[in-house]
Image (tube, coloured by chain):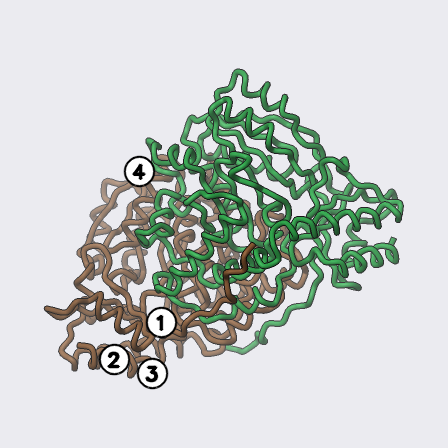
Chain colours: A brown, B green
Amino acid sequence: MEKKFQSLSVPRRVLLGPGPSNVPPEVLQAMALPVIGHLDPAFLAIMEEVQAMLRTVFATTNRFTIPISATGSAGMEAALVNAIERGDKALVCVNGVFGVRMCDIVERAGGELKKIEAEWGTPFQPDQVRDALKNFPAAIVAIVHAETSTGVLQPLEEISRIVHDHGALFVVDAVTSLGGTPVNVDDRKIDVCYSGTQKCLSCPPGLSPITFSDSAIEKLKSRTSKVQSWYLDMTMIEKYWGPERVYHHTAPISMIYALREALRLALDEGLESRFDRHRRLSAQLIDGLEKMGLEMLVDRKYRTPMLNAVKIPCGVDEAVLRKRLLERYGIEIGAGLGPLKGKIWRIGLMGHSCAEENISLILSALKSLL
Amino acid sequence: MEKKFQSLSVPRRVLLGPGPSNVPPEVLQAMALPVIGHLDPAFLAIMEEVQAMLRTVFATTNRFTIPISATGSAGMEAALVNAIERGDKALVCVNGVFGVRMCDIVERAGGELKKIEAEWGTPFQPDQVRDALKNFPAAIVAIVHAETSTGVLQPLEEISRIVHDHGALFVVDAVTSLGGTPVNVDDRKIDVCYSGTQKCLSCPPGLSPITFSDSAIEKLKSRTSKVQSWYLDMTMIEKYWGPERVYHHTAPISMIYALREALRLALDEGLESRFDRHRRLSAQLIDGLEKMGLEMLVDRKYRTPMLNAVKIPCGVDEAVLRKRLLERYGIEIGAGLGPLKGKIWRIGLMGHSCAEENISLILSALKSLL
């Protein structure tokens, strides 16, 4: 065998796209700790810590609060395939890529889908959900908290009340919001909430934190059919993360180390300070962009601080600009998706990437390239 | 927020269980490299390298050879839910935990399951498969190459011929065998083969290498229904790993770094040397165990070198012994599962853990404890 591959090296990037975000050195160092067994008492202790810290970050007392052993998209699938059975009615709110994906998963799971839509870049109004539920006794209502494809932050309180008035479970995608803006699972009575590690938690991608309310657990336990995915079957995974410690699959040890450290750093900073940092620096970025004559996609009232969608000025080759940002400045920003392709850039300020020096960097780079 | 969590530290262990195995320092260092974006040209180049090296390790020219973004168990699910549609007939060979799991997944996928069984600790004989296929026109036949729960290495050549004579796809679980003993996907005409990273590749757990033959791809493309799992839908994942680079989910960047380095180390050693090391050191371990009066579970002819199942002597409290091994020597070995619980220990010699000094260590530790 020829030895044609050299030892790996990677470029340094300033990650200001839709995720992953830059990972702090403490978290990277945790990834390099020696691997131990998934049933080792020392690892079981780490699992307990991760669960406790995740509860704090989700703002919940839900016992069943764990990281799924796959990325945020698997969290979406886990939420949906566990919460519904074949034939269950599911109302999905679509105003971006991730709402579209939810519909796809509901249909694969044999759910009876009803879809409501809002323009990409705008949130849902409570009345729209109320109307949709009138003649549709949904088992679940699913919505995205911070739409990564548009930068909309969806208000949840009023919609949650409507969902529960109709006796449905409230499923919320917090992939981009968790750790960057309050998710408040208990206060907002969210029944199933999932996230990813690579956004505002600034842990590498690979895990999906998820939490189930008592009502969601009750629904799960009263299922008449098995969850269609073995890997994402929460009735089994609960037995590994719970006191029984029944082997299900080998946990991704190093990723759990990393999440543990990422959560510790988030709690050390303090969640309120962290949310404030995201709000403050997003405002600073937008101020700079607007001074350059650029325009934001989303109305001020509904912008999510960690994902700033800015309209591409006429006559600019957006892909060339992103390429130059990457090659000359080492900065990654995101392109538009779906109907917003070629119309917006997505500038992420997530977790560790949400830093004052990165605002100056991206603003001056954009100034010189535009 | 009280700062009650300290920076993470973990004990050092000698991992001689059923996996994970010890991870070499080069691979751990790769995990600590800075995260870059999943669409960064530098990352796309790493993906190409990983695919090329995986093909060499699987001994295949299959274009579609990638790591799935979840652990080996997700690889099993991916193999089965992509290879069958509702109503498809599936023959599953069960002689251990992982065969049982395959049956569970086939049923969740709506497959028509036929199960054949061999005693745990023994392999299947070709005639048994031939007989089972006589009146059962299976779309797939699934079998485990190295059963981690028993230590049996299943001969595949003759069974592969029978499977193809009947026009079925041959699905093989190589979670424990890949990188430790020849898998030879092309020579053995395996249509879908999946593995895990944390066994003989000595990468942390978290990814599942998988490969699809042209026939398997053909079957996938001629499906009349969507794959039931969105996250594991290979028709979509193929578009991200292929030249189109269509976004599906965010790849677990750091894990891919680690796999890249683990594969590089395996190829640097040379696959033949690596297989030889596993064979030689397993023989040395067994020789030592037998000299202590211990007896192996599996007939010499069918033992898999990386997982050595040894019978527990009468009167020994097996759990106490494992606890002492861990606490006094930092050595992890595995317990028996299912019908073999309390009857065997499973001593793994996988990848980086398969080292001469570890043989001496485990033998002397066992001597002093028994």
Kindly identify which residue carries mark 4: A112
C-alpha distance separating marks 3 and 4: 46 Å
- Closer to the camera: disc 1 or disc 2? 2
Give the amino acid at mark 4.
Glu
C-alpha distance separating marks 1 and 4: 39 Å
C-alpha distance separating marks 2 and 4: 48 Å
Label located before the other in sequence (2 or 3): 3
Label located before the other in sequence (3 or 4): 4
Q: Chain of mark 1?
A: A
Kindly identify which residue carries mark 3: A356
Q: Is residue B272 above or below residue B187?
A: below
Is disc 4 surrounded by few (<14), some (14 to 19) or many (20+) residues within 10 Å? some
- Closer to the camera: disc 3 or disc 4? 3
Q: Chain of mark 4?
A: A
Q: Nearer the viewer, residue B262 or B310?
A: B262
Residue at figure coordinates x 73%, y 53% from the top left: B333
Residue at figure coordinates x 15%, y 72% from the top left: A295
The mark found on residue A15 in the picture is 1
Q: Is residue A228 left or right of residue B26?
A: left
The furthest residue to the top? B135
Give the amino acid at mark 1.
Leu
C-alpha distance separating marks 1 and 2: 14 Å
